[in-house]
Amino acid sequence: MLPAGTRPRTTIDLWGPPVEPLGGEVPEEALSRLVHRPKEALDTILDGFIRESRAVHPGITARDVGTVRQVGDGVASVWGLPQARTDELLLFSSGVMGLVMNLETDWIDCILLGSEGGIQGGDLVWSTGQRISVPVGERLLGRVVSALGSPVDGKGRLFVDEHRFIERMAPGVVERQAVDEPLSTGIKAVDAIIPVGRGQRELIIGDRQTGKTSLALDAIINQRDENVVCVYVAIGQRKSSVLQVMRTLEQAGAMDNTVIVTASPDDPPALIYLAPYVGTTIAESFLDHGGDVLIVYDDLSRHADAYRELSLLLRRPPGREAYPGDIFYLHSRLLERAVRLSDDLGGGSITALPIIETRRGNISAYIPTNLISITDGQIYLSPELFNQGVRPAVDVGLSVSRVGGAAQTPIMRQVSGQLKLSLAQYEEVAHFARFGTEIDRATQQQISRGERLREVLKQSAYEPLELWQQVTIIYAATRGYLDELELHQIRDYERGLWQYARREYRSVTRRIEEDRDLTDELERDLEALVTEFGDTFARNEE
C-alpha cells in the first residue's frame, strides 16, 4: 500500500534494469507547482531525468549469430559465424552444444555433444568463443563420469576447483626422461617377460573375448597399494560392462584410486570420439602434481570407428578402409601425452595401456599396425592359447616390450633372464613334436621344461601377485625344481610354496620386496626355501 497523499508511479526501462525516476514519491504540492509554475517544474523534472539516465548502463552486446543449414546423424551445418574457429563450442537455441570441425567458405560443420531432437533448419546458433573443458582433480577419484565430465554413478554432484581444456600439446623431448622405473602389473607373464615401465605405452592386442580387459583390470588392481592413480576409459562399451568393471574394482579395493570415464554406444559419436582425450586430461592433472598415473583405453578400435563415422558425415575424403587421412594423427597425438617427466618438472608419469581388438588374429590390419608403430611394445593375446585354457593367453613370441629390462626390477631380471628364450624354444620344438617325429632326450627335456613354464605362467583373473610370489615360483621353475612334477600338481605346488615361504622364510620375502636385488646370500636362501619345500611336497604326495 502507498502512503496517503501519493500516487503510483511507473518505471522507466532504458534497455536495462527498471529505474525509479526522480527518486522517491510524487507529493501533491509538486503537482500543484507543475500547474502554477510549469517552467520551473519542467526544469526540475528534466534535471532529474539527466541524473537518473547517467546511472543506467545499457545491456547491449554484439554476438555472432548463425542459422542451422542442415542437421542429422549427430552433425550440423551452420550458415554464418565467419569468426568461428576449429574446436570452438557453439550454442544452439535448443541448449545443445556443438564442436566446430570443418570451416567452409559460407558455412561451418560441427559435431553435436547432445541430442539433435530439438534442432531443425533455421534455428539460431551462437558462437561462445570457448573450448571444451572438463573437471579434474582428486575429487573425481572413485567416480564414474561421462565424456563431458558429468557424474553418471548416482553418487551426487561433483564439486571441483579446477577445469581443464581437453586438448594439450604433448611434452617435448627435453621435458622427458628415460623410462627406467617398473610399473608392476602383478601378472607373471607380463612382469617377467614383457615388463612395463612408468611412462611407457604398451598396447594390449587380441581378438574379441581373449581377456584384454581382464589383463588391464589386473594391472589397475595391482596399483591399489602403489600410490598410482588409475583412469579407465570405456570407449563405446555397454553400460552393463562398465558396471561390471566398477564392481570388480570395488570388490578388489581399487576403486578409491580410480576414475572411470565412459561413453556408451547410445551416446552421440562425438562423445565416443572425445572420451579418451577427456581421460588423458584427468590423468594430466595428477601428472602435473608429480603423481604417477596408469590409464587404460578400452578400446581404441571403437574410437577409430567413431571418428571414421564422423569424418564420413563431415564429407572428409576417405582413405584406406574408409578411414580419414588423419587417423594416424588421431591416436599419435593422444598416446604421445603418455610421458615420464623430468625431475625438474616433478618426475610424474602417465603409463598408457591402449587396447585394440583384432579380427581373426589379423594384427597387420590398418589400425593395429598404426598403434603398434606408435606404442613402445605390445602384449598379444592369442585366441588359440585362450581356447587351450591358458590364462592370461599371452603369446610370448609375438609380444614385446621395447623398454625391456630397463623397466624391470633387478631381481626379476636375474630370475627370469632365460624364461622367454626357453618358452620360444619350446614353441618351436613342440610344433614339430605334434607330427610324431622322433625326438632325442635333450629335446624331450626341453619340451617338458617348456610345458611346466607355460603352466607356471597361468594365473587367475583379478588376482595380481606380489613381487616375492612371482620371484619364488619363477625361480623354482627356471632352475628345474618342477621338472619332476606332473602338470596337474604345479598349481598345488605354487600355493604350497607361498604358504611355506610366509611361514618359514618371512625374512626372504621381506628382502625380495625391499632390496629387489638377487644377492648371493638371497639366492642361497631362495635355493634352501625351494629345496626344503620340494622335499616336503614330495613326501605329502606319496
Image: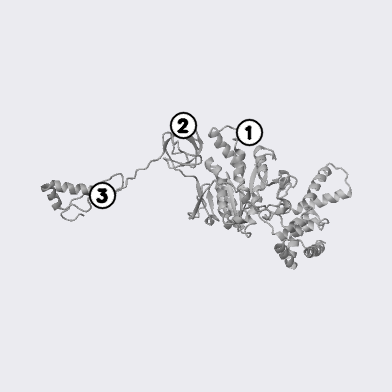
Answer few, some or many: residues within 10 Å of disc 1's Cα (few below 14, many 20 plus, some between 14 and 19): few
Answer few, some or many: residues within 10 Å of disc 3's Cα (few below 14, many 20 plus, some between 14 and 19): some
User: Which of the image's four quarters has the N terminus?
Assistant: bottom left
Residue matched to label 2:
106
Is 503 or 295 nearer to us in this picture?
A: 295
Secondary structure, mark 1, is helix
Please name the amino acid that badge 1 sits on.
Arg
Is 68 or 146 nearer to us in this picture?
A: 68
Q: Is residue 83 visible?
A: yes
Please name the amino acid that badge 2 sits on.
Asp
Residue at x 34% of width, y 45% of height? 59
Residue at x 55% of width, y 35% of height? 311
User: How far is the residue under mark 2 from the one under mark 1?
Assistant: 30 Å
Name the N-terminal-most of marks 2 and 1.
2
Residue at x 62% of width, y 43% of height? 332
Point out residue 331 in the picture as x, y percentages from the top left corner: 61, 42
User: How far is the residue under mark 3 from the one under mark 1?
Assistant: 69 Å
Task: Name above or below for residue 61 compared with residue 458.
Answer: above
Task: Name above or below for residue 405 compared with residue 301.
Answer: below
Point out residue 511 in the picture as x, y percentages from the top left corner: 72, 65
Is 411 or 424 nearer to us in this picture?
A: 411
Residue matched to label 3:
52
Residue matched to label 1:
320
Please name the amino acid that badge 3 sits on.
Glu
Secondary structure, mark 3, is helix
Point out residue 490 in the picture as x, y percentages from the top left corner: 77, 56
Q: Are marks 2 and 3 in contact (CB under 8 Å)?
A: no
